[in-house]
Image (cartoon, grey):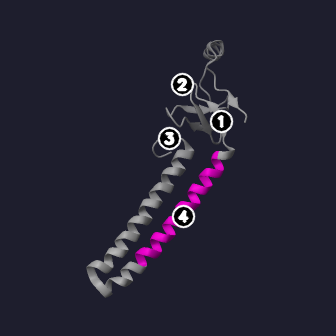
């Protein structure tokens, strides 16, 4: 991920950036009428159409992130102990950005550390709702 964050949060970030881009293009397009009068209407039309397409793309990304979020595995982060969601084999905690995995081949925990964690009850356990 670009900013080392949870996958769902990264999708939401791109949705937000598209929303801001679309709104900015719509405002700038409309400002073309104010600055150039009748000649600015073409500029306004282009800005409004591209802004609308960007906003629709943002809507699609938010919808997709919402659908992924409803089917994501919920588990407790072993570091901050908050309930977070995980997509795929590896992801990051939405709160403390700790790398999470359920694949034993990708985990770097030694058997001794796993035993100590199980004794303290601080292991990542999936919650079923």
Image coordinates for residue 36, horizontal then vertical, percent: 27, 82
Crowd band around label 1 with a 10 angstrom C-alpha radius: few (<14), some (14–19), many (20+):
some
What residue is rendered at 26% in x and 78% in y? 35
Image coordinates for residue 25, horizontal then vertical, percent: 39, 69
Residue 5: mark: 3
Marks 2 and 1, the one that precedes in the sequence: 1
Q: How far apart are marks 1 and 4 (CA)?
A: 27 Å
- Decide whether residue 68 is among the magenta residues: yes
Q: Nearer the viewer, mark 2 or mark 1?
A: 1
Q: For the residue labelled by badge 1, is the local secondary structure a helix, a strand or a loop?
A: strand
What residue is rendered at 37% in x and 74% in y? 29
Q: Find the magenta span and give its range.
A: 46-69
Marks 3 and 4, the one that precedes in the sequence: 3
Marks 3 and 2, the one that precedes in the sequence: 3
Q: How far apart are marks 3 and 4 (CA)?
A: 22 Å
Image coordinates for residue 43, horizontal then vertical, percent: 36, 80
Is 118 situated left or right of 56 in this image? right
Residue 57: mark: 4
Is 118 situated left or right of 14 in this image? right
Crowd band around label 3 with a 10 angstrom C-alpha radius: few (<14), some (14–19), many (20+):
some
Q: For the residue labelled by badge 4, is the local secondary structure a helix, a strand or a loop?
A: helix
Q: Distance between the residues labelled 3 and 2?
A: 15 Å
Q: Are marks 1 and 3 in contact (CB under 8 Å)?
A: no
Task: Give the main secondary structure of the magenta stretch.
Answer: helix
Q: Which of marks 3 and 4 is in front?
A: 4
Q: Distance between the residues labelled 2 and 4?
A: 35 Å
Q: How far apart are marks 2 and 1 (CA)?
A: 15 Å
Q: For the residue labelled by badge 3, is the local secondary structure a helix, a strand or a loop?
A: loop
Q: Mark 2 points at which residue?
A: 79
Compared to residue 34, the image places residue 106 above or below, namely above
> Where, quadrant-wise, is the C terminus in this rendering?
top right
Q: Mark 1 points at which residue?
A: 74
């Amino acid at each position: 991920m670009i900013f080392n964050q949870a996958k769902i949060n990264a999708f939401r970030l791109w949705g937000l950036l598209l929303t801001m881009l679309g709104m900015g293009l719509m405002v700038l397009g409309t400002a073309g009428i104010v600055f150039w009068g009748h000649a600015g209407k073409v500029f306004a039309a282009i800005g409004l159409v591209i802004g609308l397409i960007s906003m629709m793309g943002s809507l699609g990304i938010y919808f997709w992130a919402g659908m992924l979020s409803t089917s994501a595995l919920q588990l407790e982060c072993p570091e901050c102990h908050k309930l977070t969601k995980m997509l795929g084999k590896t992801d990051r905690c939405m709160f403390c950005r700790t790398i999470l995995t359920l694949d034993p081949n990708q985990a770097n925990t030694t058997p001794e550390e796993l035993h100590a964690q199980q004794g303290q009850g601080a292991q990542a356990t999936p919650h079923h709702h």
